[in-house]
Amino acid sequence: MAEKKKCPKCKKGAPGWMVTFGDLMSLLLTFFVLLLSFAQLDIVKFEKAKGSLTTAFGVQKLEQRNVSPNSPNLIAPMYKQPIVLVKLREQVASFMMRENVDMGDAETVEDNTGFSIQFKGEAMFEADGLTIRQNFQDLLRQIASTLAGDANGGGNLIRVVGHTDNTPPPGGAYPTNWALSMARAAAVTRFLAEQGIDPRRLQARGLGEFHPVADNNSSAGRQRNNRVEIQLSTQTLPRAMDNAMVEIIKPVE
């Protein structure tokens, strides 16, 4: 009878294939952790790293920060502003349709600094040049109510800019087109402030005849140049200004 061969002794420790398998699992785990770290990107650290690289390559840019450096939302408002402005523009367009405002008399224009609502001066104001017509008052009330809400970007700066054509102001009440454009801008600014918008967000400017959008040699062109713009900026009211104003108006005990 043949003698049975003895089974060789098993080597101590894990089999060779298991070591390779463990290395593979470790690498996969590391890979997914890396993906997760990108998904949960720390914006503050990212901005610091970006700034260091920018400086190293000789490109430097001074940026204004309108929020406290200790705030967790230091960078987030930069990315929320475009979304906020798009929503506001859609709401304003719906208001104009609801109030039956001729789209030629009022329109929204978007640019890289935000968007603006442009009103034809002759359509917006009564014959005296400063009294806002009733249908435009109703529209401005709805716009002011929207712009005043914190949920809709309540801190955005609002610039009211008046423009004229190149003809002298009628009636002699204003010595220059600068004065007329400034008076119209101030009238709209005051109306918006009366509707509840924080006056610190409002700025009134009169640019006269020097920023036309059409040819002043035609009646249609002059009508387009006689306009008032309400510009909603991506720039927001600085929080530091908020705190400073609170301290200034705090009563002395």
Image (spheres, rainbow, N blue to C red):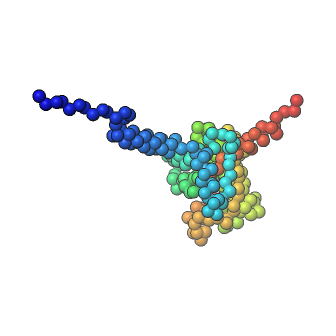
Residue 183, percent across and down?
72, 54
Residue 100 visible to an observer of this rendering = no
Instruction: Please give left or right for residue 52 compared with residue 176 in the image.
Output: left
* Position in image of residue 119 (x %, y %): 59, 54
- The residue furthest bottom is 217
Q: Nearer the viewer, residue 184 or 71?
A: 71
Residue occupying image coordinates x 63% and y 39%: 72
Q: What residue do we see at 51% from left, 53% from top? A: 103
Height in image: 100 above or below 227? above
Give above or below for 196 relative to 78.
Answer: above
Locate the C terminus and report the quarter of the image it occupies: top right
Residue for point 34% across, 35% down: 11
> In the rendered view, does 64 fall on the left or right side of 106?
right
Q: Which quadrant would residue 69 be assigned to in this image?
A: top right
* Quadrant of residue 154 within the rendered picture: top right
Q: Is residue 84 left or right of residue 241?
A: left
**Of 202 and 11, the residue lying toward us:** 11
Residue at the spot 52% in from the left edge and 56% down from the top edge: 104
Given the current orientation, which residue lies at the most extreme right position? Answer: 253
| Picture quarter with the N terminus | top left
Residue 16 seen in the current view: yes
Q: Position of residue 111 (x, y in %)?
A: 56, 57
